[in-house]
Amino acid sequence: MTSHFSTEATTEGTPEVSAAAVDATPDRSAMQHALDRATVPGGAPGIVVEVREGSDAWFGTAGVSDTWTGQERRPSERFRIGSTTKAFTATLVLQLAAEGRLGLDDTIERWLPGMVAGNGYDGRAITIRQLLDHTSGIFNYANDAEFFKNGIGEAWLRHRYDTYAPEQLIRIGLATPAPFAPGDAFLYSNTNYFLAALIVEEVTGGTFAEALTQRIIRPLRLTGTYLPGTEAAIRGTHCRHYSTLFASDAQPVIHDATERNQSFAWAAGGIVSTTGDLQRFFGALLQGHLLPAEQQREMFTSVDTAGPVPWIPGTRYGLGVFSWTLPSGVTVWGNAGATYGSWTCAMGSRDGEHLLTSQINGDWSGLPVLADILTTEFGTAVTS
C-alpha cells in the first residue's frame, strides 16, 4: 500500500511530493484504511484513489496492479473507465449545442433519419436531451439476452476480439419494444449514447474519436486518455483487469480480461484514461471551464433514476453526469462506470473544488467499495 501528498500533479497524475505539502495536507489515514479494506482476501486485486482539495492532491493505493508479478498500483496507470465515458460524450454534444450547431430538443430523426423507427419507437418523438438523460425509452442493447450470452464465461473468451459497428448495436437495442413513451421514465441505456455519438459525427463531419481528441483530450492535455476503437491491448503503462466474466458460481474463476476489443462499448463506455486525467477533465467540467453557463445548467438538470429497472439508489441523472446521495447523506457529482475487470468513479463537490477519482481492477468489487471511499473522503461536508 502506498500514499503520496502533493500540491501539483503531472498531466498523467503522477504526484510531485514535497515535505511542505505533507504538512499542509489533511490526514487521510482513514482513506488508506478504506483502500486496505477493499483489498482484503476475496476483495479487489488493487485500487487507486486520487484526491484533490483546493490546491492539495493525495494519491493512495492498496493491492496490486498485476497478481502474477505482484507489481503495486502506480499513479500513471491507464485503465478502462466504462460508463464514465458518458460524461465525455455528453460534453461533446453540449459543446455543439453551445455553438448553435444542434439543439438539445432536436429529434433523432432530424440528424439520423430513419434509424429509429418501428417496434414502438419513433425517432420523430425522441430528443437529444432524452438520449443524454436516459428518458428516451430506448432499450439497452447490452441487456439483450442473445447479445449478453456472448459476454459470459467461455463465450466471452471466444468473442473477446469481436468487432461491433455502432449501427449493429443500435439495431439490437431497438429489437426490444419500447417499454414506455419518450420522457415518461428513466431507463439507463448504452444505446442512447451510441445514437448521441452518431449525431456528433453527423454534425461535425468527422469521427467521434476525432471530436473527442480535438475538443477535449488535446485542449486539456489528457496524455493518458484515448478511445481505443478496435485495439485490444491498452497502450503504455496499465493495470491488469480481472473479471469473473459474470459467472454465477459461488467461487468463480477469475480471468485476466485486460485485452479485448472494446468496440461493444464505444461512446457509452470505451475510453481508456488515468486517475490524473479524470481529475483534470472532471475538475474542468464541474468548474464550468468546458461549457458556457447555459449548457452547464442543462448538464446538471437531473431526473429521478427510479424507473422500470431501478438504478443506483440515491441518484439523479443529468446529461452525462449524475448526483449520488450516499448512505451518510453526502451528495457528490460526477460519473462512474464498470466494464470487464474495472470499476471507475470520478465524483466530488458540485463546484469541483474537492474531487476524488478511483479505479478498482476487479469487477466483483464495485459500488459498495466506491460508496465507502467516497463517504470516507467527503464525510458530511458535500451538499447537492
Image: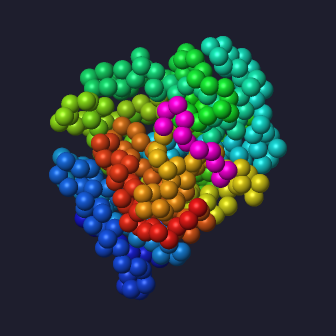
Horizontal arrangement in the rendering, residue 156 relative to residue 277 (left or right): left
Query: What's the image's color scheme?
Result: rainbow
Q: Position of residue 329 (x, y in %)?
A: 47, 62
The one nearer the camera, 362 or 315, is 315
Q: Vertically, is 194 above or below 168?
A: below
Q: Where residue 297 sits: x, y (%)?
A: 72, 54
Q: Please check the rendered image and state whether residue 308 is part of the magenta-colored stretch, yes or no.
A: yes
Q: Is residue 278 visible?
A: no
Q: Is residue 162 above or below residue 354?
A: above
Q: Considering depth in this image, is 383 or 207 the residue closer to the camera?
A: 383
Q: Is residue 234 above or below residue 356?
A: above
Residue 222: say if magenta. no
Camera sees residue 378 = yes
Q: Which residues are magenta?
A: 300-310
Give the residue displayed 62% in from the left and 13% down from the top.
119
Residue at x 62%, y 45% (from the top left corner) = 303
Q: Main secondary structure of the magenta part?
A: loop
